[in-house]
Image (cartoon, helix red, strand yellow):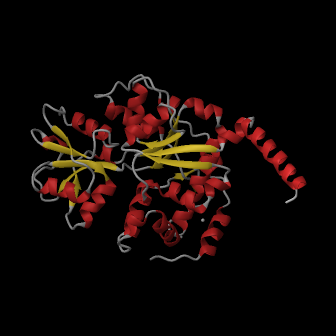
Amino acid sequence: MRYSTDKTRSKRWGALLAVVLAFAMVTAACGDDEASDDNVTLTLPFGESMSFFETMMGDELGYFVDEGLNLEIQTSDGGSLALQQVISGQSDFAFTSPGLVLTAAAEGNQLISLATRLQKNIFSVVVTDDSPIQTTEDLRGGVLGVSDFAGGEMPLVRAALSLAGLTDGDDVEVLAVGDSSPAVLAALQDGTVDAYAADWFVFFGIEQSGTPIREIIPAELANLTAEVLVATPQYVEDHPDVVERMLTAMAKAAYFTTYDRDAALNILRTRIPEEHEDTAVAPDILALFLNLAAIPESGGVQTWGVQSAAAWETWKTVLGDVTDTGSINVADILDSSFIDKANDIDFDAVEKDADDRNLSYP
């Protein structure tokens, strides 16, 4: 396995057709479990974006179809709501943060993390570069803006405040101000908020306006695993073949994206045109998320989806003051048994797929 960091009419006929259609209807109604497994639902924590490059590309390239999957992609308003869709049985899979998974587990929900798609923390707390605030502790008596109270940044916010010895509502006011980069920048500049917590996609928009920003959270939080693919234990037990095929399609799409960024950008422009209004900026957006994905070394080869028990233990520690995570056994949540199989793909075929398309950007 290898990954490159830079380079898809007579009555007789009428009667026969009726018999065939009737047989097909009966077969569909009495089909086996494997056939029904082909229909899968994935919930994203927000709208379609280059952030989810392996999902968007896998869908556009037909890799999910190649794996026999009829994928329905749903969107939600935050990682908590995406996770709730899985817990309630309304979705088979969801992307969400480990912090939210641990919080849900502490509340008695059984969940399985199957793969890590963002190895670095996509969430952070920032201030404008000219702000007098240097650390989270300096927020005492101030206002911390967030995108939404159900946003994926909330576990990080709670952990950062706890580590700083601050309490939401008493020492710091937490205020939802949305995730529009221009609106957030205005709130930072007019003093509505003293700092802002969200994901790097929002921060990227702020930086593109020409306003430098800097992080004010401890390094142990900045380097936490950010986003994982989850399902319920029952789903994984009932549909292991679907899980393997799901991850295989994503691994192939991730490789295609890293192998040929220009081709990926060309394809993603069709899927998500709003992120390509400025074709000079779009490559930087994709580069941002590939950097956060940081597909790591595993056994001498680069493998998509690798999970780190140590990172989850760090999550447990930083959440410990605000969530009862002490009794949670990380081993009960992490299932990495599908990772090697998912990455056992024909890399030469993926490269040929990209080369044959011969796509340039812009």
Q: Along the horizontal axis of the image, is 71 left or right of 324?
A: right
Location of residue 186 by image quarter: bottom left
Q: Nearer the viewer, residue 85 or 168?
A: 85
Q: Along the horizontal axis of the image, is 15 left or right of 248?
A: right
Residue 240: percent from left, percent from top: 65, 38
Q: How many marks?
A: 0
Q: Is residue 109 above or below residue 236?
A: above
Position of the C terminus, as image quadrant, is: bottom left
Location of residue 77 by image quarter: top left
Residue 345: percent from left, percent from top: 66, 56
Residue 216: percent from left, percent from top: 21, 49
Among all residues in the image, which is located at the extreme right?
12
Residue 198: percent from left, percent from top: 29, 49
Q: Nearer the viewer, residue 199 or 162?
A: 199
Q: Along the horizontal axis of the image, is 291 left or right of 172?
A: right
Among all residues in the image, which is located at the extreme front?
11
Position of the N terminus, as image quadrant, is: bottom right
